[in-house]
Amino acid sequence: MSLKIDTREVAHVTILDIHGRIVLGDEIGDLRAAVRNLVAEGKKKIILNLAAVDYIDSSGVGELVGSFITVRNAGGELKLLNLTQKVHDVLHVTKLYTVFDIREDEFTAVKSFDYFFAK
């Protein structure tokens, strides 16, 4: 199954709705290109909605970290939303859940960029 990425904006936050598998090959290339294009456009508040991601391999995890670093180096923030159980388990085993800001619902994720509402 190929990776499908839909982009939308909610309250000045860009959300990438990702569908499919984040694995070595064209899939991580598509994710990398999507994130870098947003950074090039000056988008600094990015959420990756992983609700429809059914599998992620080690290369996919590496790409999530790479995307996080790309956005951070550009002065922005990248957050994860709606992790599936498989993605959650991978991030837990790799201890990367301590690196990413992970949110369970879209409203909280979007509001977390507003420092007045952030916890």
Image (tube, grey):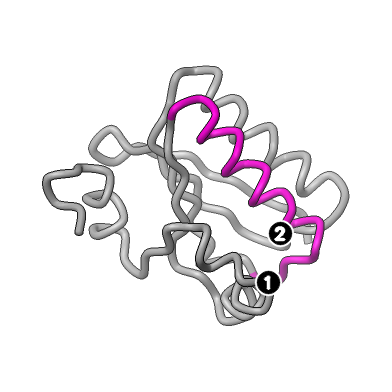
| Residue ID at (71%, 52%) | 3
Q: Was residue 107 drawn as part of the magenta stretch in this picture?
A: no
Q: Position of residue 32 (x, y in %)?
A: 69, 38
| Residue ID at (24%, 58%) | 107
| Residue ID at (52%, 58%) | 99
Q: Was residue 68 drawn as part of the magenta stretch in this picture?
A: yes
Left or right of 19 on screen, residue 79: left
Give the numbered dot on residue 94. 1
In what element is the residue under mark 1?
Answer: loop
- Return the disc, 2 or 1, that comes first in the chain's sequence: 2
Residue type, numbered disc 2 = Val
Left or right of 30 on screen, residue 96: left
In front here: 52 or 98?
Answer: 98
In front here: 6 or 104?
Answer: 104
In what element is the residue under mark 2?
Answer: helix
Q: Are marks 2 and 1 in contact (CB under 8 Å)?
A: yes
As drawn, 103 above or below 71: below
Residue type, numbered disc 1 = Thr
Corner quadrant of residue 101: bottom left
The stretch in magenta equals: 54-75
Label 2 to label 1: alpha-carbon separation:
9 Å
Tag 2 residue: 61
Give the numbered dot on residue 2. none
As drawn, 36 above or below 92: above
Q: Position of residue 102 (x, y in %)?
A: 43, 63
Q: Magenta part mainly helix, strand or loop?
A: helix
- Badge 1 crowding class, 10 Å Cα cut-off, few under 14, some 14 to 19, many 20 or more, is few
Q: Position of residue 13 (x, y in %)?
A: 33, 38
Q: Nearer the viewer, mark 2 or mark 1?
A: 1
Farthest-out residue, top: 41
Corner quadrant of residue 103: bottom left
